[in-house]
């Protein structure tokens, strides 16, 4: 049952996204979906705690609390909160976010939870990393479907090496915007393919730096290449891509403003 919670949550969020705006069931279905989504995140923190990944522990706890917050707001249907605040509809913003969570969640969990899709994506990224490395003159030896080697040093390609998290995030956010196709297309093209391509370059850089010990020992080289240089580069790239997407789809900014207005409204009423 536990492993099916994420599919139940996403299924309800998808249904809520397609139910007509005037339906009285839309709020209830969406609210229950967000509450089940919170259960999924509650179950994740222990995994990251065992890995001593405290950043992700904090993120999963925050995600769980946020999902509960949104779920209860939708279930209560408080007209004082779900109205127009500063000229922005909080209802529209919440359902845009619901659509983003549904589509983005499906885009990610299909590859993280279904073994066949997981293997296909990781294997494909491994193939293309090897190909791109050959273009740059880097010699990578393939040892298995997800295992490669440079200069005798082995590297395992895992799901995080595919950039599927960032790709799913942008797919969900872009799909949630109520905009014409002529603006969807460029927003998609400057985000998803660019992120995928940059991630392949990142893989080649990290693997070569590790295998050829660019920065000292193999462990130090991996840390500097992966955790420092590649991480900073990824954050800069994602910031620039997000800025470009927001310029094309300003509706996303309205969604963010609507959710922030809702949070401020909750605190105002609580005070």
Image (cartoon, rainbow, N blue to C red):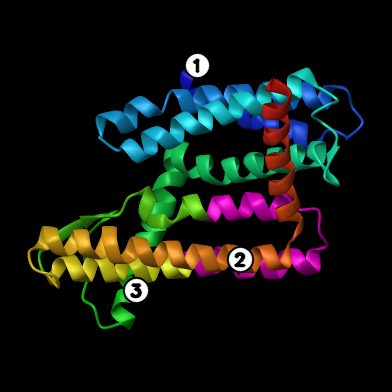
Name the quadrant containing residue 14.
top right
Question: Can you identify the residue that label 2 sits on?
Answer: 243
Counting labels gives 3
Q: Position of residue 22 (x, y in %)?
A: 92, 31
Instruction: Name the foreground residue: 89 vs 29.
Output: 89
Question: Who's the residue at 81% across and 22% down the image?
Answer: 78
For the stretch drawn in magenta, the main secondary structure is helix
Question: Can you identify the residue that label 3 sits on?
Answer: 131
Q: Which of the two marks, 2 or 1, is nearer to us in this view?
A: 2
Furthest toward the right, the residue is 22
Q: In which quadrant of the rendered image does the C terminus lie? A: top right
Alpha-carbon span between mark 2 and mark 1? 40 Å
As for residue 231 lying within the magenta part, the answer is no
Relative horizontal placement of residue 155, taking residue 241 as reference (left or right): left
Question: Can you identify the residue that label 1 sits on?
Answer: 1
Q: Are marks 3 and 1 in contact (CB under 8 Å)?
A: no
Can residue 128 be seen here? The reply is no
Q: Position of residue 49 (x, y in %)?
A: 30, 29
Alpha-carbon span between mark 3 and mark 1? 41 Å
Provide the secondary structure element on which disc 3 rests: helix
Question: Who's the residue at 44% across and 42% down the image?
Answer: 116
Mark 3 or mark 1: whose residue is earlier in sequence: 1
Q: The magenta stretch spans which residues?
A: 167-196
Q: Are marks 2 and 1 in contact (CB under 8 Å)?
A: no
Q: Position of residue 162 (x, y in %)?
A: 41, 56
């Amino acid at each position: 049952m536990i492993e099916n919670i994420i599919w139940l949550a996403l299924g309800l969020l998808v249904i809520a996204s397609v139910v007509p705006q005037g339906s009285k069931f839309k709020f209830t279905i969406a609210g229950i979906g967000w509450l089940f989504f919170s259960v999924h995140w509650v179950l994740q923190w222990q995994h990251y705690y065992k890995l001593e990944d405290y950043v992700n522990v904090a993120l999963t706890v925050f995600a769980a609390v946020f999902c509960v917050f949104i779920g209860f707001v939708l279930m209560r249907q408080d007209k004082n909160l779900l109205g127009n605040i500063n000229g922005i509809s909080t209802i529209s913003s919440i359902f845009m976010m619901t659509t983003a969570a549904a589509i983005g969640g499906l885009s990610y969990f299909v590859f993280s939870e279904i073994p066949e899709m997981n293997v296909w994506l990781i294997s494909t990224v491994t193939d293309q990393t090897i190909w791109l490395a050959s273009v740059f003159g880097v010699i990578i030896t393939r040892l298995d479907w997800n295992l490669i080697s440079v200069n005798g040093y082995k590297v395992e390609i895992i799901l995080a090496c595919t950039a599927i998290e960032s790709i799913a995030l942008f797919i969900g956010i872009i799909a949630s915007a109520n905009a014409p196709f002529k603006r969807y297309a460029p927003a998609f093209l400057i985000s998803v393919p660019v992120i995928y391509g940059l991630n392949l370059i990142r893989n080649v850089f990290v693997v070569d730096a590790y295998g050829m010990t660019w920065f000292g020992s193999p462990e130090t080289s991996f840390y500097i290449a992966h955790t420092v240089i590649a991480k900073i580069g990824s954050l800069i790239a994602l910031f620039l891509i997000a800025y470009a997407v927001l310029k094309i789809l300003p509706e996303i900014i309205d969604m963010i403003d609507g959710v922030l207005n809702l949070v401020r409204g909750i605190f105002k009423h609580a005070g």
